[in-house]
Image (cartoon, rainbow, N blue to C red):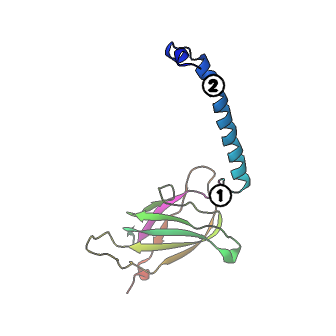
């Protein structure tokens, strides 16, 4: 393709020369995708499910904390842990940085913290980590709701 072809608006030569290049790039991308999925670089692993709900402590929304969904290995469930932040008594694994839960027997761990205080660097938890055993069966579409109510007798002394 000459400069003259381009200047006068004849894009046929331009399309022809780029077309071969585009085909080559497309082929290379497809080959790399195929190689990466065979090599295990694609998205794989156990299926995670979205979970959301509320956490109450002494009948009130838990100010903040974390909730972890650990597969219960003692009941044959193994895999990665799901986690979410609790803010104003609510959590969801659909938030950025959260991870969904696996299906089956789980040990759910809840850590509760007081409201944020800029003067306190390391706040003291409101209670010892709270454990709940759950046989998690997700709904077919959308997040599954799991609500937790922690009694006041768990309060730290």
Task: Report helix, strand or loop for mark 1.
Answer: loop
Of labels 1 and 2, the one closer to you: 2
Query: Residue extending furthest right?
Result: 38
Residue 103 located left or right of residue 6: right
User: Residue 28, how many percent across, how many down?
Assistant: 68, 41
- Indicate whether 111 appears above or below 40: below
User: Residue 145, how many percent across, how many down?
Assistant: 53, 58
**Which residue was labeled with disc 1?**
47
> Residue sitting at 69 percent across and 75 percent down?
75
| Of 42 and 58, the residue lying toward us | 42
Residues under labels 1 and 2: Cα distance? 45 Å
- Give the quadrant of residue 112: bottom left
- Indicate whether 81 appears above or below 33: below
Residue 111 in magenta stretch: no
Mark on residue 17? 2
Query: Residue extending furthest bottom?
Result: 157
How many other residues sit within 10 Å of disc 1, few (<14), some (14-19) or many (≥20)? Answer: few
User: Residue 83, how many percent across, how many down?
Assistant: 52, 65
> Residue sitting at 29 percent across and 75 percent down?
120
| Of 104 and 61, the residue lying toward us | 104
Task: Report helix, strand or loop for mark 2.
Answer: helix
Marked residue nearer the N-terminal end (1 or 2): 2
> Residue sitting at 31 percent across and 69 percent down?
116
Q: Which residues are magenta?
A: 43-57
Query: Residue extending furthest top?
Result: 8
Quarter holding the C terminus? bottom left
Residue 130 located left or right of residue 21: left
How many other residues sit within 10 Å of disc 2, few (<14), some (14-19) or many (≥20)? Answer: few
Residue 48 in magenta stretch: yes
| Of 153 and 40, the residue lying toward us | 40
User: Residue 154, how many percent across, how many down?
Assistant: 44, 81
Quarter holding the N terminus? top right
């Amino acid at each position: 393709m000459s400069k003259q072809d381009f200047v006068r608006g004849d894009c046929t030569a331009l399309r022809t020369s780029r077309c071969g290049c585009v085909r080559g790039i497309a082929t290379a991308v497809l080959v790399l995708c195929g190689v990466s999925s065979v090599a295990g670089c694609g998205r794989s692993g156990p299926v995670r499910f979205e979970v959301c709900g509320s956490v109450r402590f002494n009948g009130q929304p838990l100010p903040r904390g974390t909730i972890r969904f650990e597969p219960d290995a003692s009941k044959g469930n193994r895999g990665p842990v799901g986690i979410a932040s609790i803010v104003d008594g609510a959590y969801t694994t659909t938030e950025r940085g959260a991870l969904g839960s696996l299906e089956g027997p789980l040990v759910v761990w809840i850590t509760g913290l007081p409201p944020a205080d800029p003067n306190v660097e390391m706040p003291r938890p409101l209670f010892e980590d709270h454990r709940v055993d759950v046989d998690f069966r997700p709904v077919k579409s959308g997040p599954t709701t799991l609500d937790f109510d922690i009694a006041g007798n768990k309060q730290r002394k």
